[in-house]
Amino acid sequence: MAPDPYIELLKKVISGHFHRENGMRINYLLNVAYGAQPFDLGKVLDIRSHASDALARIEADPDEASNYRERIFGFPYSMLGQKRLYNVEAALRIILHEKIPGDILEAGVWRGGACIFARMLLNHLAPDSDRLVWLCDSFEGLPPSEHEADKPHPFHLDLSLRCPLEQVRENFRLFGLDPDHKTRFVRGFFADTLPRLQTGGLSLLRADGDLYISTMDILENLYAQVVPGGFVIIDDYGALEPCRLATDEFRRRLGIRDPIRWIDWTGIYWRKGEAGG
Ligand SMILES: C[S@@+](CC[C@H](N)C(=O)[O-])C[C@H]1O[C@@H](n2cnc3c(N)ncnc32)[C@H](O)[C@@H]1O
């Protein structure tokens, strides 16, 4: 199928494709603030020329795995690169085509970009559909985790991983969406909110909580709600060992043999019941 120009543009806007230099600009200003570099207004105004090597590395890296620091400060709405956004698109197209019932849920939404993308895709491809998009997050960052696997990753201290609920709702509005239309916001740490959450069935579960404890809370509480043929996407499987451990442990415990497919350097997915289990 020929790419849909509207969806192609949407992916670029959501991933910050048109303003890749913003992350570099912020990174440079942080270095100035920390005293690592002298201030030079010319660099702020024309960071593309001054950081051309770093920019070229980013632009030449289709897997979007390198220069994470420059990238993260430049992500406007989502940390997902093009391939993981494409994976959401491909999964949704299959869900619609195969009429797999159920809502879309992301646990770990940060600025909401992946959910905005899913909501806009559904509005575009299936405007009459009553599928909901669920957004689950503390909206105040990650919890401190006592789990041994998480100890090397004190992400709860990382301010860049926090995004308040009202900012996510505002991001929906920026894209012309009513944040209360066919969406549900579930606010709080997964351990508190997910055990009580009843969705009525999920065709797509997107786990993006980084840690062992967060990934395990998502899978333990929501996997049963994924319908046969539904997609289970784990964003951090390649990037973060705690996430990989939790996923592998959960799959082993439940005897899940559905094949894992890689999306890019970090994201994976499987389809529930594909192996017939
Ligand atoms: C890597 S970011 C998610 C990126 C996002 N999916 C995107 O499109 O860019 C991780 C998010 O997970 C949330 N999070 C992680 N563990 C959590 C937990 N146990 N309870 C609630 N929120 C959690 C954080 O608040 C943060 O917003």
Image: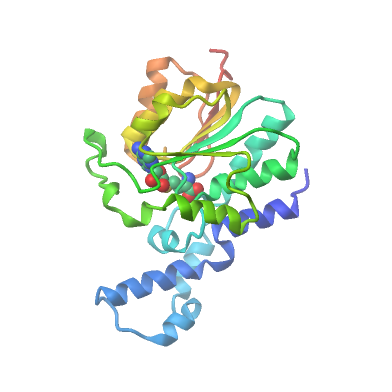
- Quadrant field for ligand 1: top left
Residue most extreme to the right: 2
**Relative image position of residue 8 (x, y in whole percent):** 68, 54
**Relative image position of residue 202 (x, y in whole percent):** 57, 27
Q: Give the number of marks.
A: 0
Pick the front one: 147 or 122: 122
Name the residue: 65% across, 36% down: 92
Name the residue: 71% across, 26% down: 99
Pick the front one: 28 or 66: 28
Q: Quadrant of residue 216?
A: top left
Residue 226 in sight from this viewpoint: yes
Residue most extreme to the front: 180
Q: Is residue 115 left or right of residue 253?
A: right
Q: Quadrant of residue 226?
A: top right
Name the residue: 72% across, 34% down: 129
Q: Is residue 229 left or right of residue 149?
A: right
Residue 62 in sight from this viewpoint: no
Q: In the rendered view of the protein, which quadrant contains the N terminus?
A: top right
Classify 27 as above or below 98.
below
In this picture the colour scheme is rainbow
Name the residue: 55% across, 61% down: 16
**Relative image position of residue 252 (x, y in whole percent):** 39, 19
**Relative image position of residue 223 (x, y in whole percent):** 47, 23
Classify 255 as above or below 50.
above
